[in-house]
Amino acid sequence: MEIRAYDPERDRDAVRACFESGFGRTMWPIVKYSEPRAIDDMIEVDVKSCNVSLVADIDGIARGVLLGSTRTGPGSELRTLPYLFAFIYRRWVTDRPAMRPFARAALRRTLIGEIPYYIHSPRGESAEIYDLTTMEGYRGGLGRALVDAFVEEARRAGLNRVDVGTDTELAWGFYERYGFQRVREFPLHIYDYSLPDRDVTGYIYSLTI
């Protein structure tokens, strides 16, 4: 296994497969009712918003991915907005066929549902993990190796804390086993379309490094 930087030309299809494998249960309306270019667009928003994009390469194929940021300062969270607005414009105006109506409705709920993460995020200078997922069948060590590499990136940037937002439907236990401490929890309505019968709680974890 090799941890290396994400290459959009080389890794696009494999990283999309990682996201569909890792988030398919919670985001199934978007995955099922969107064309591949729409999923690629969603991933690209996070890639462009981050300054650290890593993949776990096994036999030349990305089987895990971590997207995160070691940028800090007042404008760090605002860097996402231009890419997000461009993505929304494509999905709702110029390239509507790439997502069917149910997928767009689920995406709208997802975008609104992420607002509590911004409200409850701890203040102060820290690195942040945006996305971490691995391909089913390749789990068991890849996530830890990716986080290890990201922690080193954070240290090189002079930071002493890593934050991550997750929830009760995702692998929150992984972060506790790694050593993260839960610092926030709050009701979350991000999966109202994909998991309508579930009561979901959002978590924010922090790791002192």
Image (tube, rainbow, N blue to C red):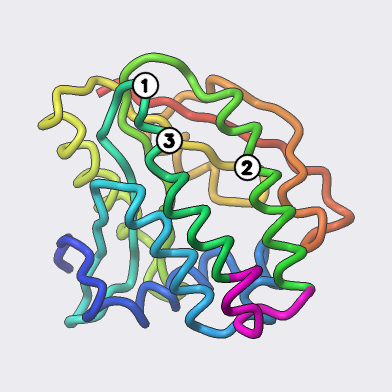
Which residue is depicted at the point 52% across and 37% down? 165
Asked if residue 93 lies in the magenta stretch, the reply is yes
| Cβ atoms under marks 2 and 1 closer than 8 Å | no
Query: What residue span does the magenta drawing correspond to?
Result: 91-101
In the image, residue 18 lies at what x, y percent? Answer: 43, 71
Label 3 near label 2: C-beta < 8 Å? no
Of the numbered discs 2 and 1, the one sitting upstream in the chain is 1
Q: Residues within 10 Å of mark 2 (few under 14, many from 20)?
A: some
Residue at mark 3: 78
Quarter-wise, where is residue 62 in the image?
Answer: bottom left
Location of mark 1 (residue): 74
Q: Local crowd at mark 1 within 10 Å, few (<14), some, or many (≥20)?
A: few
Write down the quadrant of residue 166 in the picture: top right
Magenta: main secondary structure:
helix
In the rendered structure, does residue 18 fall within the stretch colored magenta?
Answer: no
Q: Which mark is residue 3?
A: none
The local secondary structure at tag 2 comes to loop
Q: Which residue extends farthest left?
A: 156
Say which of 118 and 179 sits in front: 118
Query: Could you tell me which residue is drawn at 52 percent across and 54 percent down?
Result: 85
Tell me whether circle 1 and circle 3 mark residues in contact (CB < 8 Å). no
Residue 1, horizontal then vertical, whole percent = 17, 68
Total labels: the figure holds 3
Q: What residue is shown with label 2?
A: 114
In the image, what residue type sits under mark 3? Answer: Leu
Describe residue 144's horizontal placement relative to residue 130 as left or right: left
Q: Amino acid at mark 1?
A: Pro
The residue closer to the viewer here, 112 or 161, is 112
Q: Which element type, helix, strand or loop, lies under badge 3?
A: helix
Q: Answer with mark 2 or mark 3, whichever residue precedes in sequence.
A: 3
Of badges 2 and 1, nearer the viewer stands: 1
Examine the image and state in which quarter residue 61 appears: bottom left
